Amino acid sequence: MFEVEELRKKFKTTTAVDGVNLYLEKGESVGLLGPNGAGKSTTISMMSTLLSPTDGDVRYNGKSILKQPEIIRPVLGMVPQEIALYEELTALENMKFFGRVYGLSGKKLDNKVAEVLELVGLEDRKKDKIKNYSGGMKRRINIAVALLHEPEVLIMDEPTVGIDPQSRSYILEMVKNLNREKGMTVLYTSHYMEEVEKLCDRIYIMDHGQVIASGTKSELKSILSSEETVLVELQQKQVGFADQLSELDVVQKVIEVEQGFKIIATKADQLLADIFDVAKREQVQIIGIHVQTPTLEDVFLHLTGRKLRD
Amino acid sequence: MWNIFKKDLLTISRDRSEVIMLLGMPFILISILGFALGGLIEGETSISQIPVALVIENDQEADLADFEALLLEQGIPSEAIEEIVAGAKGADPAQVFLDLLEDPELEELIGLTTYEQAADAAADLEADEVVAVITIPKQFSYHALASIFLNEEPESVIELAVQDREQIRASVIENLIQTFTDRYNLETSILVANDGEPIEASFAEQDFGQVTTVSRAKPVTAFQYYTIGMAAMFALYVGATVSANAFKEKDTHVFARLIMAGERPLRYLTSKAIAATILTFMQLTILFSLSNLLFGTFSGQSSKYWLGMFIITFTFSFVIGGLATLLTAITLQSSQDTVSGIFSGGVVTILAFLGGSFTPVEQISPFIRALGNWTPNGAIMTAYMQLIQGFELTSIMPLLYRVIVMAVVLIVIALIIFPKRRIA
């Protein structure tokens, strides 16, 4: 339905997107995961025809949209990372303004605005100016505007940045419903692993302008199927302990965390015994040890050596 | 397009700083400059009727009789006395002066009240009830006639007492009396030289300091000048405001959202031009109406005059629309609001100076005036001024054509540099 082929974007001195390939099937919910600066926003700007790529192609239903943006625009709802609204206007005035730009008018416009305001749960605050809204409410209206024309594809660029957990939960639930109940195709970019895990059927992981992994949640986690993650909580952290652990044959990575160290290692029977041996040798007191199921965060860590929010 | 205009009007009207900048500031400046610099602009001192006290201690009949007795004492033959007395009756300075004061045209300038007692007049002068007290002293006519016909030393003069606090208005009365005296002396000299043939003592109105306008044009009042001047200056800010809003729309990704929603870039630019044109027209209409309502700036004008005002105002709004288009195009092309900042921070002031918003630049240099007439605001100011001065609209039209050409040039440049695709 929506395909991106070898997409590249070079700016003067940097390559923001470097040969990205991805696709979205109708009714799918796809996550685009990556840290800040990974190239996610540039990729979706090109997918939504707001930015010309240096190279590559973007197709919708088999037709290139780069030269014919009018193919995608009527069916695409774009939720930018920024609050792209008029702060001095009320929510209702913003909705009606953008509704008219979408070509709605009269009763149809009124009905659609009322419907979307109800969907985002802001009907009772519709006459308040946007500047008087909380961060979460602004985000919800920001999404609402993109839904006015009932798009087939919804691209959301970090729609939950900087808001309270309650608003985040509301937005995630809303997006889930749009995808599952209305069959809307969703491309959701975020650097919050748990959001993507909750919402998306498939995930693309981006770093340094490239897709470094993709697949369903289970496919991605299977990257770590031969490995396990062990969190060791210590009374007091010692660098010598981490160095000793790194020298073990089965250990691939030792990452310092707040309460101790996270160890990514090849599955092996004697791993826990080896950890206790090293602790004894280094006279380090272990106060807790957890063997963890791999998360997407672990996958990202494994692939890049960095945490998502570094 | 109407949708974008309505949105622009709402956002600007709800931004307090914009409202102050576009309406509050010019109106305050019109008020201050109109009151403070009235004399400089109008080239006349617009003075309300000056209250003056007149005390007549002189008895003309008695003085004439005394003068006749004096002539007899001098041994002048009775036939000659008859001739001199007949001449003296027509040349009695007290009567001539009173006739002058009662002249209907002078009545507009001087509100004359005759007092019986000098003390009452002095008390009213002290109490600021009158600006000056003119006293025609006892035996003024007698001494004046003796001076004229017998060449005796003048012993009596018209006395004038003025208030220190009302210097400008008092000086008008002083000038009046001085001019009268000079003129009277001249007339009587002619009379004597004419062997006593009486001549009519007439005074042209301009001798008394009344306003004379050298050109055929009607004078422009300070309020008219500064209402036009400030409106012409602050209308330029509409262009900067519209382009600054366009930058804000791009910076906050609203513009990208508009493009995604199906708005075409060129239609967006056209909407901005129309919005700026209508906003300017509204701004100018509000400023002119307020000034007229509070200061009577354009009161009593004909419908032809208002038609002229409409045409000039619309032309000016159109060129501001063109200016806003160019500033918006540059802003969106460069993705920076530096251009609107530079425009509102410096260029507006320079254009306002050249156009004559602060002071009539022709008084500084004809070259600056000529240069100013090649700025949109300067050309429009000249057009407004010519209309106020009573010029026919047909003679103003060449200036308006010039402004329309400027607007078209601005729009063409804007279209050339405006990015047509993917500018979000």
Image: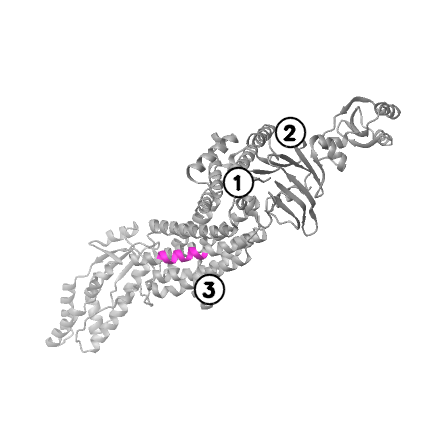
Q: How is the image coloured?
A: one colour
**Residue B279, horizontal then vertical, whole percent:** 43, 50
* Quarter of the image where one finds residue B155: bottom left
User: Could you say which is closer to the camera, residue B257 or residue B10?
Assistant: B257
Q: Is residue A26 above or below residue B351?
A: above
Check disc 3 and give the amino acid type.
Trp
Q: Is residue A182 left or right of residue A21?
A: left
Question: In what element is the residue under mark 1?
Answer: loop
Residue A85 circle label: 1
Check disc 1 and give the amino acid type.
Leu
User: Could you say which is closer to the camera, residue A69 or residue A142?
Assistant: A69
Give yes or no for contact between labels 2 and 3 (Cβ–Cβ under 8 Å).
no
**Magenta residue span:** B309-319
Residue B374 circle label: 3
Q: Is residue A92 left or right of residue B334?
A: left
Q: Is residue B217 left or right of residue B73?
A: right
